[in-house]
Structure formats: C-alpha cells, structure tokens
Amino acid sequence: MDTSTHAGGSAPPPAHGGHGAQPLRRTLSYYDLLIYGLAYVSPLALITTLGFVWQASNGLIVLAYVLAAVCMYFTAKSYALMTDTVPSAGSVYGFARYSLGPFAGFIAGWMILLDYMLIPAYIYVLMAVALGTLIPQVDRALWIVTLGGVTLGINWFGLKVTSRVNLISVALQSALMVLLTVLALVALHDGKGDGGLTLRPLYVPELFHAKSIFTATSICVMSFLGFDAISTLSEEVKSDDKRVVGRAIVGVLFLSATLFVVMSWVLGDLMTGFTIKDPASAIYELSGWAIGPWISMLIAWTTATVNFTNALPMQVGVARVMYAMGRDRQLPGILARIHPVHGTPYVGMLVTTALSIAVALLMRFQMDELVSIVNFGALSGFLLLHVSVIVLFWVKGRSGRWIPHLVLPIAGMIVVLAVLAGMSSLAMTLGVTWLIVGLVYGTILTRRRRTELTI
C-alpha cells in the first residue's frame, strides 16, 4: 500500500482491521476529550511530587517543570500528527502497526499495556494508603477491591457517564489548586518564604547544576503522562474532523503545563527557607506551616476521596487498547466484544480491572517498587511513536517538512532515551523482561500469521 497518499492528507487509513468486530460508539466531543485528558493527568499531580522535585532541582522547581513541558511537547505533536492520519482506538499500537508494520505494532501495543495496566494498580494502592491513614480500621486490601469495583461500575455505563464524573473530579481538584494558590500568595505577602514572587524558583546561577535539573525534569515528566491516552478514544469522537483528537492532546498538555508552572512558581517561593522532613508529604508540611493545619487536612481528604477518579480514564484507556488488539487478533478476540446497550468494550474492562486489582493486591505493601516500573511502558511506546512519525511522513511520504516530521520526533526520541537511561535498575529489569516476553509472543503470532491485518 502506498502510504504517501495518507501522509499527504487525502484518503485516511482504516481505523480497524476489518474482522467484523463491533464498532465503538461515537459520543465524545472535543471538551469531553479535554476533561478525559485532564482527569488522567490530574491537577493534583504536582503536589504529590513537590518535595522530590524541590530537592532534586536544588529549589529551581519552575525551571524543571518548564523543561519537562517542552520535552513533552515533542511527544504531544507526534501524537497529534498520527491521530490526524490514523484514527485508531489502539493509540500507539495502531500508529506503529500502520507505519512500521504488524510486528512493530504488536510490540508497541504490548509495551503500552504495561503502562496502562500498572497505572490503575498504582492509583488503587495510593488511594488505599491514603484512606487507610484516615480510616485505619479498614484493611488496605478491601479499599483496593472497592476502588476497582467503583471505577468499573462507573465506566460500565459508557463514556458519557465517565465524562460527567471526570468533570466533577477535575472541577474539585482545580478548585483546590486555586484555593491553595491564593492562600499561598497571601502567605507570601505576609512574609513567608521569599516574601513575594521572585525569579529564584526559575533560575539562580549558584543553584544551577545540569545533572540535578535533568533529574528533577525526569520526575516532572512523569507528572504529564496521561495526555497521550486521549488517542485511545479516536474511534469514539462525534466530529468528522480528524484534528479534534490532536487538538485535545496538545490542549491538555498546554493546560497542565500552565497549571504546573504557576503552582510551582508560587509554592517554590513559599518553600524558600522551609525545611522538608519527608519529601513524600512536603505539601502537607508546607501548607500546615505557611497557611494552617486545616488546609493540610483539606488537601489530604481531597486527595483521598476525589483522586480515585484518576483511575477512571486509565481503566478506559487500557480497555480500548485491549479492544483494538483483540479486534486485530493480537490478543483473544473476546476482548473486542462491545456491550449491546452501553457500547463499551466490557470484556476488556473486566479483564483489565481484574488484572489491575490483582497487581495492586500483590504489591499493596511495595508501592515504591510499583512506582519504579509504572512508566517504562509509556516511554517505550513514545519511542515507537516518534519512529512511526519519521517513517510514515518523512521516509514513506517524503513530505519534505523536516521540522514536524523529522526534527521534533528526533528531539522526542532523545528525551525519551535520556529519561529511560535515568530509570531505576528494577524498572529496567522488569521492563526488559516484559519486552522479551512480548517479542517471543509476537514471534509466535507472526508464525501463525495472526499479525497480518486484512484491510
């Protein structure tokens, strides 16, 4: 097939493999996609890593978030380019399959599954820990099973229901961030920290060390992960404009970056002169010292009660990837079944929820190890995404547009490889093991001719 036609913007490729699987329902608007992406990224993401970024950056927390936003821009642009051309529910799986071939597509889907399945498990454990702290009488395992069941119940009834819950969650989290920002500004005015907004959190020559900033930036990059999952909903958008998904991806990145930079600037000035006892609870220590104990409790309760909704879009994303891979015979075909009433890939949701709960139960007392591997799959998927852009547009399509189709994806690849190089040995070991299993399984599929896709 001549892909240059598609790369040039005319006839789009098919969205699926044509094996008779039921199509997903088109019910989502541009704003539904924005809310979905913001719920996945989470407005509260910054405060959960505040202490770690502050320590790693030597206080240059704004610089770290700005650099992270620039880094993720490369990936967002590659996603936007591919969703305009390959509208697939499989996200990077569909992109790599169309651009690089069936085997590469399978590996891309296999690696992104690692990320998409582990993130809900991480959220379940994180929330179980928070709720267990507030209500210690309830066992952590019970919280995990309950949270998994609640997210499954909400997603079961379709994305319109999920979108309403996501909207409420994003609104509550955003309101808390606005309140915290205002109160922090008042505390600065009253003489806390630097006594006002300064350039200190952005750049101070004597505090700048390239290695420290890169370490901090790699932590900040993790706060942005999730905007890419919007691409899993490409086949459920009402509009015929193929640019809607790409615009939503870039829009979520822009909104998240703006929020994180503003918050880190205010909190960065407030933290000057403040000694952190535990980086994991830095926001509670800081807010209690600068504002009052009541705001610390409010943040804790909001995190414990609202943040569980972050698992909603995560569960949606992984179910769509399994749906696409099941439809294309890369995984058991039963995963491509659609609920006759609600139009959701219900088998995929049941399977992924069970797997996420099982992993969460298994590692409920090893959250640090779970965190260390949760993003390996995402970064591996991003790497194949950038390769797909270069091959589809620059090599096959011969577009001649060297900035969007060559320079930006290469820059994105460099960033991804740098972040991967800085990951823990445990994450690398488990990630590489998952990759090897995928290569073996993919080879078996190839020999059975199940990686072929009839178009």
Image (cartoon, rainbow, N blue to C red):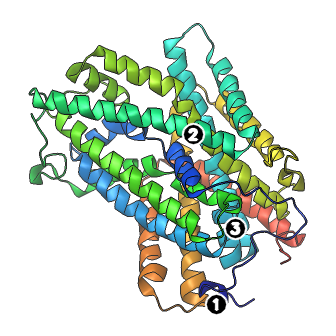
- Camera-nearest label, 2 or 1: 2
Q: Quadrant of the N terminus?
A: bottom right
73 relative to 1, above or below: above
Q: Nearer the viewer, residue 260 or 322?
A: 260
| Left or right of 234 in this view: 37 | left
- Camera-nearest label, 2 or 3: 2
Q: Residue at the location (54% across, 18% down)? A: 131
Q: Are marks 3 and 1 in contact (CB under 8 Å)?
A: no
Type of amino acid under label 3: Gly
SS category of the residue bearing label 2: helix
User: Can you identify the residue that label 2 sits on?
Assistant: 166
Type of amino acid under label 1: Ser
Q: CA distance from mark 3 to mark 1?
A: 17 Å
Type of amino acid under label 2: Asn
86 relative to 274, above or below: below
Mark drawn on residue 442:
none
Q: Nearer the viewer, residue 407 or 187?
A: 187
Q: CA distance from mark 2 to mark 3?
A: 26 Å
The residue most toward the top is 137
